[in-house]
Image (cartoon, rainbow, N blue to C red):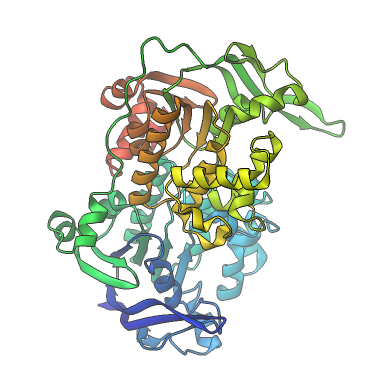
Amino acid sequence: MTLLDIKDLAVRFTVEGRAVDAVKGVGFTIDKGETLALVGESGSGKSVTALSVLQLLPQPMASHPTGSITFDGLEMVGASDKKLRSVRGNRVSMIFQEPMTSLNPLHNIEKQISEPLILHKNMSRTEARKRTGELLELVGLGNLKGRLKDFPHTLSGGQRQRVMIAMALANEPDLLIADEPTTALDVTVQAQILKLLKELQAKLGMAILFITHDLTIVRRFSDRVCVMTDGLIVEAGPVAEVFDNPQHEYTRHLLASEPKGVPEPVPADNRPLLETDDLKVWFPIKRGVFRRTESYIKAVDGIDVTVRPRETIGVVGESGSGKTTLGMAILRLIASKGGIRFDGKDLQGLDFKELRPLRQEIQVVFQDPYGSLSPRMSIKDIIGEGLKVHGMGGTEAERRSLVGEAMEEVGLEPGMIDRYPHEFSGGQRQRIAIARAMVLRPRFVVLDEPTSALDMSVQAQIVELLRKLQMDHDLAYLFISHDLRVVRAMSHHVLVMKDGNFVETGSAEAIFDAPQVGYTKALMAAALNLETIEDDSVRA
């Protein structure tokens, strides 16, 4: 039986008198208990279509020149606020893409999960608290029942996503809209979240509209798929049929976009550039009136790393394993104990002033290019800021020329130099972040999840770019990522982290083709076949 029926839907945004057609005549249906995937690259119109179902697009900027959205017989386009409120969060719920920005940072977990229960079910606070505990058990967060007063920033990415799911499922909806619910999650957490959604779907009989750019997930999770580009659905059908025999050129392009290849071998005579020796980052846990230290969180606990020019060391592991903390400690951006040597020089013994000249040679590219680029600065100023700090390029004209050269090197048009970050796509913003690091001609770069939020075709482009820059400039990389497909395409050597320690290390070939440790095997199973992962093996 058809639950959602979308016909000839168009979405137009009008900004400063200029009209942009984001969705152009889209139509599809979803039956009760069915999972439909809406796939495509950033800007294709996926999320705009999903937000239209609940009429959540900004008004009066957004309009529907044509189209109908019928949910269980109720027309959503043009519906009154009263009717929409009866549906939103009650019969139709939505899991948004980024839980950290979707959850209210000022409200604790209990308040955020219980709010839809109080609003739609008229529960008392006592009843809502009990139901909140049941929902946390349902989504695998029973260990948080004693932390209901905690705030979102105290949780890991996977925990925050599960809280979002608990909120969405609070009223047992008929339709769940999941907008990129696993994009920034580790592969094992991805597998657990998708397994959880499937179990809840079977239990509650709900339909799912699943929005993603990850085709690996679609193949294993969905019944039917619609492929979108430029506001249009260009191909639709059963998942197996579309994936095994794609008819449209764009669908074939998506299926062929996975990062491929391996990096060039490292010359045997390359000497170590960066080394760590028994590196530790322990965060104290203080309690009581006098805030005495009772114990420590051992985020990084005795790590040895060696990186040579032209070598990429991949660091993988789940959220909270210590990957990013390791990178920040090596960069001397957080305090640590143990040895850190760069080109034979001990970095731990240097103060801020002594360390500053070395910042030119040791750079970082952060995970979120939009968050790491100042929205108030032009691209010229963002990329050129380091040149000023380190006295490179004597005049403004010379610095502008260097910025233009860096932009060209990463595949950006120098004519865009005076634009601002919001005028670029996600892939372009990541290229800007890479140019900001590369303009200083570093020798060692920490790459912290540089492709996690990007479409697969853009991921492949960034991987190719990073490999080219490495060969052109003899760069050493520490590559931190949860995406094992990208790690395999980038890395010579792989370090698998769990609870602040390495559980397995070896060449990329050895780790991927013949993992020895149960935890590594669980990561590989999650990356290669999201249905085979078992919770017990993840904890091993």
Q: Is residue 387 visible?
A: yes
Drawn side of residue 462 relative to residue 262, left or right: right
Q: Residue at x 31, y 23 (%)?
A: 515
Total tally of numbered discs in the picture: 0
Looking at the image, residue 151 lies above or below residue 267: below
Give coordinates of residue 424: x percent, y percent.
Answer: 50, 59
Looking at the image, residue 10 lies above or below residue 323: below
Residue 414 or residue 115, whichever sits in front: 414
* The quarter of the displayed image where residue 266 is located: top left
Give coordinates of residue 115: x percent, y percent.
Answer: 61, 67
Farthest residue toward the left?
A: 245
Residue 232 or residue 461, whichever sits in front: 461
Residue 302 or residue 429, whichever sits in front: 429
Give coordinates of residue 99: x percent, y percent.
Answer: 54, 55
Quadrant for the C terminus in the image: top left
Quadrant for the N terminus in the image: bottom left
* The quarter of the displayed image where residue 516 is located: top left
Q: Is residue 298 visible?
A: no
Q: Residue at x 56, y 29 (%)?
A: 327
Looking at the image, residue 265 lies above or below residue 65: above
Residue 315 or residue 13, whichever sits in front: 13
Give coordinates of residue 98: x percent, y percent.
Answer: 52, 56
Q: Residue at x 55, y 87 (%)?
A: 82
Q: Residue at x 32, y 25 (%)?
A: 264
